[in-house]
Image (spheres, rainbow, N blue to C red):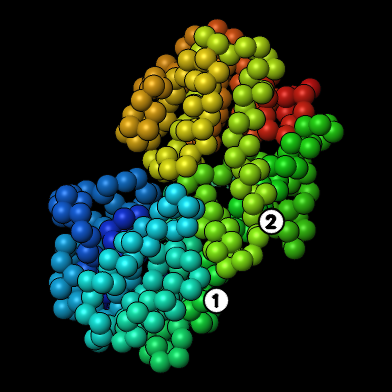
Amino acid sequence: MSAAGSSDVSARGPIGVVGAGWVGLVTAACFAELGHDVRAMDVDEAKVATLDDGELPFHEPGLPELVERNRERLRFTTSMEDVLEVARLLFVCVDTPPTYSGDADLSRVRAVIGNLPPEGEFAIVMKSTVPAGTGASIKRDVPGLAYVSCPEFLKEGSAVEDFMHPDRVVIGADSGDEWAADEVAAAYEPLDGELVRTDVASAEMIKLASNAFLATKISFINEIANVSELVGADVTEVARGMGLDERIGPSFLRAGIGYGGSCFPKDTQALKQLAGNTGYHFQLLNAVIEVNELQKRRVIGKLEKHLGSLVGKEIALLGLAFKPDTDDMREASSLVLAARLQGEGAQVRAYDPVAEGAAQELLPAVDLAESAEQALDGADAAVLVTEWPEFAELDWGGLRERMSNPLIVDGRNFLDAAALREAGFTYEGIGRPNGGAGGG
Ligand code: UGA
């Protein structure tokens, strides 16, 4: 693929997007930016009205500007006919949340397919994360539909950048649907990044395996952190030394209080179930999931080490979103942590720069502060949960006086341990003995 923006814009055909959630909107706005007319459909009338008013239902850096800049080329609708009227490629971006059994819930995907004519001059391009085998099953049910698997690898918080500069674009199609795969490849042609053309089942598996591997890296480094604490090593140093081996690589080796979000927890569970359903016990993935669950709770032990019983203690959580630059709190470590702290009898207050709206609903018993300073006022301990850059900029020297007890548990190894200890804090990181490197 060539550099972004180098192709002839007039050659780009209209694109349909079904599901105007986070993946769908990013996909729609980015294809509009590349010069396509895009019709994005969602069954939620209120959401379509909001989008028509030029507002976005969630926080994603760069996306509002992109939507605004491409308003002429972006149309939102609740009608599938509107989309099919013009689009040959139908990017399906509906969500596939976990069911009670841990399998992915495909009801929204099935509803989309059920609403389509059984054949026509269009192709389904599946972006929703689905179990391997879903494409084959849809083709069995509706053999006249052209079907392409094109999983998305966007990260929340940098989704626009990731779309425009992908590491790779995976396009899976089976025999008979190559024409559709060619058209999808043409749509991505202006972008840099490797193109992986393969069959549908392999494309589906690439997505699940990629997320499972990244989750494995995180659980692995978290276990190394836990062992490091016992043997007097510093996991940030260990990760630095490991990451320089190009077979290992430096990314996703940040130890902390576990991964969250709408993808890793759901997709690891779904792959585990998918394996189980086909008679395979995926041992490694089971361990990855269990390590992540336990990791979220380790903060409690660290607090108790310094405070004893947590009954009546006031604990301030800094950050609630599952990671910075998003207001998404799905499967956030903060949810488990807040519930565990309350279970131990602590009073929990919290501050997050953007996730307040989501937090009000999900954490009704947590006191939400309007600033980090307010959250820390009179607190017996602070726990850094999400590494928002503004937390590194706080006047920690001044804040020490405002807290009842100057204890910081840095759940992301994000703050300057040495400076905090200098300022009189007791600092506990994750996998960093004696309060963190340089902390003495
Ligand atoms: C993840 C993948 O990175 C994307 O490639 C994929 O497209 C997406 O899921 C998806 O399936 O839709 P995302 O959930 O936005 O993207 O978040 P990540 O940046 O991957 O972070 C996930 C979690 O891992 C966060 O809670 C983060 O704090 C944690 N993490 C990440 C660590 O604890 N340590 C690390 O070294 C890296």
Three-letter amino acid code of the residue under disc 1: Ser
Judge depth for marks 1 and 2 and give the one in front. 2
Q: Position of residue 59 (x, y in %)?
A: 34, 45
Q: Position of residue 365 (x, y in %)?
A: 39, 21
- Cα distance, mark 1 to mark 2? 21 Å
For disc 2, the neighbor class at 10 Å (few under 14, some 14 to 19, many from 20) is: few
Q: Quadrant of residue 130?
A: bottom left
Q: Residue at x 49, y 27 (%)?
A: 339
Q: Is residue 408 left or right of residue 186?
A: right
At mark 1, the secondary structure is: helix
Q: Residue at x 38, y 49 (%)?
A: 61
Q: Is residue 180 left or right of residue 111?
A: right
Q: Position of residue 319 (x, y in %)?
A: 47, 31
Q: Which residue is mark 1?
A: 202
The answer to whether 19 is drawn above or below residue 14 in the figure is above
For disc 1, the neighbor class at 10 Å (few under 14, some 14 to 19, many from 20) is: some
The image's mark for residue 291 is none
Q: Is residue 319 left or right of residue 232?
A: left
Q: Residue at x 75, y 42 (%)?
A: 224
The answer to whether 206 is drawn above or below residue 94 in the figure is below
Three-letter amino acid code of the residue under disc 2: Gln
Q: Quadrant of residue 410?
A: top right
Q: Is residue 83 left or right of residue 130?
A: left
The image's mark for residue 283 is 2
Most extreme residue toward the right is 231
Q: Residue at x 77, y 28 (%)?
A: 433
For the question of whether residue 122 can be seen, the reply is yes
Q: Which of disc 2 and disc 1 is earlier in sequence?
A: 1
